[in-house]
Every structure is written in structure tokens, then in C-alpha cells.
Image (cartoon, rainbow, N blue to C red):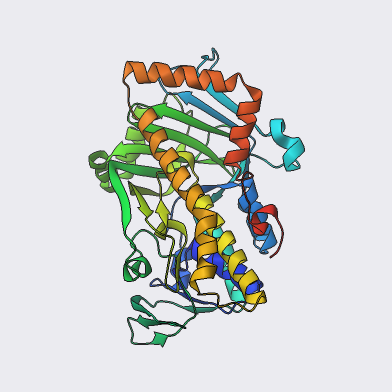
Amino acid sequence: MIAGAGMAGATFALAAAQGGLRVVLVDPQPFDAQLAPTFDGRSTAIAFSTFRMFDALGVGEGLRPHACRMDHILVTDGRRPGAASRAPSSAFLRFDADEIAERTGGEPLGYMVENRRIRSALAEAVTAAGIEVLAPASVVSVETGPARARVTLKDGRVIEPTLVVGAEGRGSTVRSAARIDTVGWDYGQSGVVATVAMGKDHGNVAHEYFLPDGPFAILPLTEQRASLVWTETTRRGEALRTASDAAFHAHLMRRFGEYLDDVTVVGPRFVYPLSLQLAEQLVAPRTALIGDAAHAVHPVAGQGLNMGLKDAAALSEVLIEALRLGEDIGSEIVLDRYARWRRFDNVALTAGFDGFVRLFSNDLPPVRLARDLGIAAVNRIPALRRAFMHEAGGATGDLPKLLRGETV
């Protein structure tokens, strides 16, 4: 049973079902509600290895018309001219997909896709696969025994699965029931997200400016649009949440007009509180965690969903192989294989993203000088630059088969 039919949960359900496991998805939201434009206004940078996984699961074809290639990424300190200016500063990073094309088969650095498009493609695939979905339905308690778990839903229904997968996000009921503690903290910031129509072609270029208050990203979307993502203090974020459309646009241009030409905000805007949260364990008796239930990170590097989908790929591979060997998929020995596979990667990336936020979200002169020198140095070392691109593309380390584009 999978608690949470969001992007990580639905992807895991597809992967597990493809390998012969019988799964049930449970979610408190009506399944159709997740497809509404007002449900999730974010867009996600999908690593090229993650898109291989979507292709292997039969989801990629439906996503491609809505996926915008990121062929170039420009990273710069927002107080300097930077890589996108007429007089480039030395303190910038430029990543080009052509530099690693021989090893990636011409893949871009990633694909920008609106979350609602991902949710829609996953929902269509889940329905086509005949996966049972109980929604709206909420998990209120989970009890584990030697052979099965006992899950009680809010409406009184009881499910007795071999394994319970927690994929319901930061407030995971499954994680709490398993008595798995978390470590983390609030950043006192909010992520502000808006989609804009661009006045000129974005050229499949993603811009990341590091400003004293936090990063500001211009991320390319299809139809000459872009997703704007920037960090504000919690107080300013709440003010923007309730501001009129005219006031919001005025603030946007006042803050970032120097980076934007003629843009028009299209669709609803969204404000999300930012925090870090890491589960101390990935597994417990008859329980496994994936996605934000296991690790919720700052969006500075755009890797949160990719981490969660790598969890889904690894867990499904472990369980499918255990099923074929006739093992109990909910046993401690099987779940420990998943935990050992993903534990180091999750902890290292979470710590790295937190350090990245702290390094770039301040304006102390010594820190600014050190990071500018570091950025300039990386930009001048092709091998190091290519290593960063492979890491961002999710193509390093012990990859699950799905992230290599193979079925399990």
C-alpha cells in the first residue's frame, strides 16, 4: 500500500506494478483535484536520467510536448553583470549540454515541466495500468505485525498490506506511525512562484541569479513562457500571497525588472514556506519512506523531486527483485537493501543543498569574495564543470535500472 498519490507515490506505483507487485494508492485528495491548474503551480527541472525513467514507465511520450529542454544554464551573482550581460563578469558559471553530449546521447541538461503536466501524465498511466486508487481516503493509523501491516483509513476501512510506503510529504502519517524522527529547520523564507509570458524567446536557457535575500531563477517553459522562482522573507511572502495582481506585478518588476524584459504574469501565483526536513531512518518494520516523507530540501538546486523519484526507482527495483526470489518484500533484510542504497545519497545531497543556501543567501563581503572566486575557478576547469553537469543530470553513482532507461 502506498500512502500518497502525488508524483513520487504515483511513479513508484507504476514502477512496482510494472514489475508484478500489486499496489493500492491512498490519498486524502480526490485524484482529479491534483490535475487542476490551481493545485500546484510549480514547475520542476527534471534531470535527464529521471526523464529516462518516465520513458521506461511509458509516461515520457505524453510529457514530451510539455517539456522544455534546458540546453544552457547560466549561474551568476546577482550584484555582478554575470554571464548573461554584455560585459560578463569572471564570477559566473556557464553549463552547456553540448559539453557532455557524447556521454548523454545528446540529452539536454534537464527538462522544465509544469507539475500539473507531470501529475496528469502519471494519473493517466496509473488509470491505464489498472492500479487501485482510494481517494479521497486518509490513513489514520498503521500497526505492524510479523507478517503484515494493518492500516486503518478515516472512513473505517482496513487494509492489510505486506508493506506500507509513506509518500505523503513532509507531514507523513506513515512516518509518524513508524516512530521515525526527523531533523531539520525552517529557513524563515518562502518560495514565490509565478509563470510569465516572455517578451522574447528564452532560447532554452535557464538563469540562476544569487541575490543577498536568496536565489532568483528564470526557468524556460514551452510556448515562450518561463517559471520564475525566487526567495522572499516569510513576511514578504505572505504579503505577496494576498496582494492584488497589479501590486504583485509591480513588485516583480521593481525587484527584478533589470533581469526581465517585457513579461506578463499568466495563471495563478503560489507561495511556499521553505524548510529542511530529513527522516532519521528510511525504513521501519514493514514500512519504507520515499520522496518528501524521507527528505524535504530547499529548492535552490531544483533536485527535490528528482531525489524522490530516485527513491521510487531504487525501492521498486529492490522489491521486484525480492519478489522474484520469493522473499518477503516487507522483511527487514529486504528493506535494509533499499535503506543502504539511498541513505548516503539523500543525506549528502540534503546537507549539500543546505550549505549551498547558506553560502549564497547572504551579502557578507568575505563570503561573497570566496564564492565568486570559487565560481570563477569551476568555470575555468572543463572536467569539473562536466562533473557538475553529470551530477545535476542524475547520471552518477549506483543508478537504479529505471534511471538508466531500463525496465526492471
Residue at image location 62% in from the left, 65% down from the top: 317
186 or 89, nearer to the observer: 186
- Counting from the top left corner in percent of width and height, residue 301 is at 48, 40
Q: Which residue reaches farthest front? A: 333
Among the 4 quarters of the image, the one containing residue 391: top right
Q: What is the quadrant of the C terminus in the image? A: bottom right
> Residue at horizontal 56%, vertical 50%?
113
Residue at point 38%, 72% (across, down): 28
Image-based side of 145 in relation to 67, left or right: left
Residue 235 shows up from this direction? yes
Q: Of residues 56 and 143, which is closer to you in this image?
A: 143
> Residue 71, position in %: x, y?
65, 35
Residue lying farthest to the top in this orientation? 87
Where on the picture, by quarter, is residue 238? top left
Is 363 placed left or right of 224 in the picture?
left
User: Is residue 314 left or right of 183 when viewed as pictured?
Assistant: right
Q: Residue furthest bottom?
A: 157
Rendered position, 381 above or below 250:
above
Give coordinates of residue 141: x percent, y percent: 32, 77
Asked if residue 353 is positioned above or below residue 407 in the image, the reply reads above
Residue in the foreground of this view, choosing between 113 and 257? 113
Q: Is residue 201 visible?
A: no
> What percent of the width, then of the height, locates residue 259?
46, 26
Task: Decide: is 284 above or below 237.
Answer: below
Label count reads: 0
Residue at the (36%, 43%) spot, across then down: 191
